[in-house]
Amino acid sequence: MAFGWEGEKVRLVPLDIEKHLANAVAWVNDPDITANLLIGDMPITELAEREYFEHASKETKTDIMFAIETLDGTHLGFSGLHRIDWRNGFATTGTFIGAKDLWGKGYGTDAAKTRARYAFEVLGLRMLYSEYLEGNERSRRMQLAAGYKECGRLPKKYWKRGQYRDLIQTYLDRETWEAQSRA
Ligand SMILES: CC(C)(COP(=O)(O)OP(=O)(O)OC[C@H]1O[C@@H](n2cnc3c(N)ncnc32)[C@H](O)[C@@H]1OP(=O)(O)O)[C@@H](O)C(=O)NCCC(=O)NCCS
């Protein structure tokens, strides 16, 4: 039986160690997938990832992690709301599509839109923040398509694969999301 938060192409479902852990270990150790991420430059063991899963599976006070699946139940990646600040109504979002053959087909955008609906409608948040490394064009375009706007740039913040790269900061507010949902 299908469950989770459903978009047009994906479903955001709870983490399932049996179904999602082995993919996570393979994906976070794949240099192509982590080329624009802050993780992935050190080996990430099955043990470390399992501990992360076990923690993330139980503790949802400030971090909510979903696995992203297609509507037919194929596991594609992960989507998170991190460092949730309930008093001020914001969270930081992150998206990870590990199935490389499915990049650029709209799954990330649909997952981001579905997560925004969940964040604003279900959790009652008012603002989502995100960020990406300069040069991560897929992430930039995915965030634009989901309604995020650029609001800052920290020059040469992180060393990643041979160079210091700018960190671009973005946000999506409830009003923009509501207007976009009505359109
Ligand atoms: C970034 C990521 C989440 C985007 O998900 P996705 O499913 O690939 O994204 P979508 O297909 O919804 O949208 C991608 C956008 O990039 C465009 N795109 C596709 N291939 C591209 C390429 N090679 N170069 C530049 N842009 C590209 C698409 O056309 C689309 O833009 P559009 O809606 O304006 O047409 C996913 O690729 C990913 O997880 N990559 C590895 C990890 C990562 O970088 N995560 C983000 C960290 S900030």
Image (cartoon, helix red, strand yellow):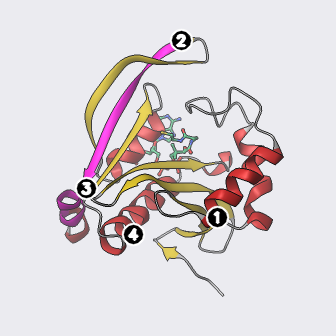
Q: Nearer the viewer, mark 3 or mark 4?
A: 3
Q: Residue at x 58, y 47 (%)?
A: 103
Q: Nearer the viewer, mark 1 or mark 2?
A: 1
**How far apart are the two marked residues, 1 and 3, measured between alpha carbons?**
24 Å
Q: Which of the image's four quarters has the C terminus?
A: bottom left
Q: Residues within 10 Å of mark 2 (few under 14, many from 20)?
A: few
Q: Residues within 10 Å of mark 4 (few under 14, many from 20)?
A: some
- Marking on residue 118: 4
Which label's residue is closer to the chain start, 2 or 4? 4
Amino acid of disc 1: Ser
Marks 1 and 2 in Cβ contact (< 8 Å):
no
Number of numbered markers: 4
Whether the residue under disc 4 has CB within 8 Å of ligand 1: no
Marks 3 and 2 in Cβ contact (< 8 Å):
no
**How far apart are the two marked residues, 1 and 2, measured between alpha carbons?**
35 Å
Q: Nearer the viewer, residue 51 or 151?
A: 51
**How far apart are the two marked residues, 3 and 2, measured between alpha carbons?**
35 Å
Q: Which residue is mark 2?
A: 163
Residue 21 location, quadrant: bottom right
Amino acid of disc 2: Gln
Span shown in magenta:
164-179
Secondary structure beneath dot 3 equals loop
- Whether residue 151 is situated above or below residue 54 in the rendered picture: above
Amino acid of disc 3: Asn
Which label's residue is closer to the chain start, 1 or 3? 1
Q: Position of residue 142 (x, y in %)?
A: 41, 46
Q: Nearer the viewer, mark 3 or mark 2?
A: 3
Whether the residue under disc 1 has CB within 8 Å of ligand 1: no
Left-right relation of 177 to 47: left
Q: Which residue is mark 3?
A: 88
- Marking on residue 57: 1
